[in-house]
Amino acid sequence: MPNGPPGGANLSGSGLPPLSDSRTRSNPLTAAQHLVVVGSRLVFGALCGTIRLLRGAHPRDWRTLRYGLHREEILDYHAALPGFARRHAVVFIHGGGWMMGTKDFYSHDLMFLPEAGYPVFNIEYPKAPEHPHPRPLRALLAALIFLKRSFPEAEGVHLMGDSAGGNMAVMAALLAADETLLKQVDPWCDPKKLPRIASVTSIYGVLDRTSLMQSKVPGLDAMFAAYAGAQALTESVGPEHAITPMDLTFERHPPCFIACGANDPILKSSELYATRLHAEGHKVIFKTYTDAFHGFFSFPEGESKQVLRQDIVGFLEFHSAAGPAA
């Protein structure tokens, strides 16, 4: 494995990102951006907490494991329910603008996957602005290495995420497919230790940076600045601030399902990326859901959410490699 550049410390020898890396925080947040971050965390936390209370007890049989040294480098695992042939696991990355949210909020929403025969790993990761890009992505790569080493069903995986998690799922898929891109984000990561990416699903993911900046979504500038510094708000960026898939040049891409609500203010981000993948000859399915807004994968319950779950299972079934019987 590469030793990495001077000044860093590969703490585990398995791709774990250095805890001290903050190369994108060259410009501190403004007072107004700090207020947006704090306010967003308070509102989002209260909303998620209320919904979790309404849902009741945490689903049974989730097991929490640690994949790194940071307190947020943990994941939850749920085995597939009995009666299914062994399938590649789903690795889910939660949303929250890279700076809020928690895996625990998705425990109920992910149960449809083990019920369809897919083991699930629900990933937590360090968040911005305390841990800006590329720290969250490096944590995800470390989690993938841990999973491949520890679980037979994670030799190959389906990546999936919503919002900022959808961004990280697609970004990780691209990094795993191209060692040059991988080394720009994590010089310590050995690509041979990563699992094969069977597919990637983006649920209203942050896939295009420039169209989102033009959308004038409230708080978006603060979110980008918290995650990747003020340079991420410029029209053109270099490798250190290429934080969305549309910022990257690539030749290989796993089969991709892109889902977004028809009333989502960041719908254009998904449309542009799906159009690009189709034009470049990659396998992509793009679907919008009538009357659905940002966040409909998690709340509220309704027809669009049910149809999305069915579509995800259908996509996974089509792109699942047959494995030995469980």
Image (tube, helix red, strand yellow):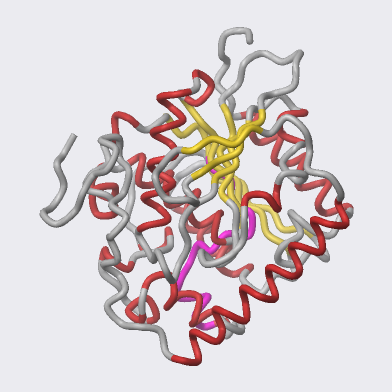
Residue 196 lies, with reference to residue 59, above or below; the image says: above
* Residue at the limit of the structure toward the top, as seen here: 325
- Residue at image coords 84%, 57%: 53
Q: Position of residue 296 (x, y in %)?
A: 76, 59
Nearer to the camera, 160 or 129: 129
* Figure quadrant of residue 226: bottom left
Q: Position of residue 289 (x, y in %)?
A: 77, 58
Q: Position of residue 85 (x, y in %)?
A: 67, 13
**In the visual, does 245 lie left or right of 237?**
right
* Figure quadrant of residue 196: top left
Find out whether residue 205 is within the magenta segment.
yes
Find out whether residue 117 is within the magenta segment.
no
Nearer to the camera, 142 or 46: 46
**In the visual, does 59 lie left or right of 275?**
right
Residue 247 lies, with reference to residue 37, above or below; the image says: above
Nearer to the camera, 46 or 24: 46
- Residue at image coords 81%, 51%: 305
Q: Which image quadrant: the N terminus?
A: top left
Q: Position of residue 26 (x, y in %)?
A: 27, 78
Nearer to the camera, 61 or 222: 61
- Residue at image coords 49%, 84%: 34
Q: Which image quadrant: the C terminus?
A: top right
Residue 16 lies, with reference to residue 130, above or below; the image says: above
Magenta-tinted stretch: 200-214
